[in-house]
Amino acid sequence: MQLALFPDDPLVRFEPSGASVRVPPGTPLIDAAERAGLPVAQSCGRWAVCGWCRMEILEGLENLSPADDVEQRLAVRQRFAPNVRASCQATVLGDVVATASYW
């Protein structure tokens, strides 16, 4: 099923590729990357266990959903920097620019 997109939906840009995509608010960041045609590493089935899907947020950190307890535990265990989020857990609420070490 294709979701209807609107011009004011959040824009997510991925660097250094420059790929970007508009997504409905509440879309997981990992889904936005996949819609933009970018591979996202992960092995835990999006259960916030492996941390491979981590993305560094270059702009718009405040435009992602707050990290819940599950993601916070992962961030502590994996020693995420303050601007790094598990893309399987963070949902897009506004414009964001993100990168991953493997792009």
Image (cartoon, rainbow, N blue to C red):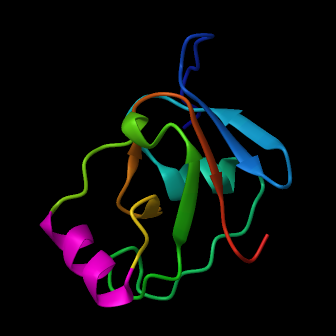
Q: Is residue 58 left or right of residue 80?
A: right
Q: Residue at x 45, y 58 (%)?
A: 83
Residue 42, placed above or below residue 70: below
Q: Main secondary structure of the magenta part?
A: helix
Q: Quadrant of residue 38?
A: bottom right
Q: Is residue 5 left or right of residue 86?
A: right
Q: Is residue 16 left or right of residue 72?
A: right
Q: Is residue 85 left or right of residue 36?
A: left
Q: Residue at x 70, y 75 (%)?
A: 101
User: Which residue in the rendered view is the most extreme toward the front?
Assistant: 82
Query: What stretch of residues is rendered in magenta?
Result: 69-79
The N terminus appears in which quarter of the rendering?
Answer: top right
Q: At which x and y percent is residue 71?
A: 26, 69
32 or 55: nearer the eye?
A: 55
User: Which residue in the rendered view is the most extreme toward the right?
Assistant: 17
Residue 87 counted in the magenta span: no
Residue 44, placed above or below residue 11: below
User: Which residue in the rendered view is the most extreme toward the top?
Assistant: 7
Residue 86 seen in render: no
The C terminus appears in which quarter of the rendering?
Answer: bottom right
Residue 79, placed above or below residue 24: below
Q: At which x and y percent is residue 93?
A: 40, 31
Q: Residue at x 37, y 87 (%)?
A: 78
Residue 74 counted in the magenta span: yes
Residue 52 seen in render: yes
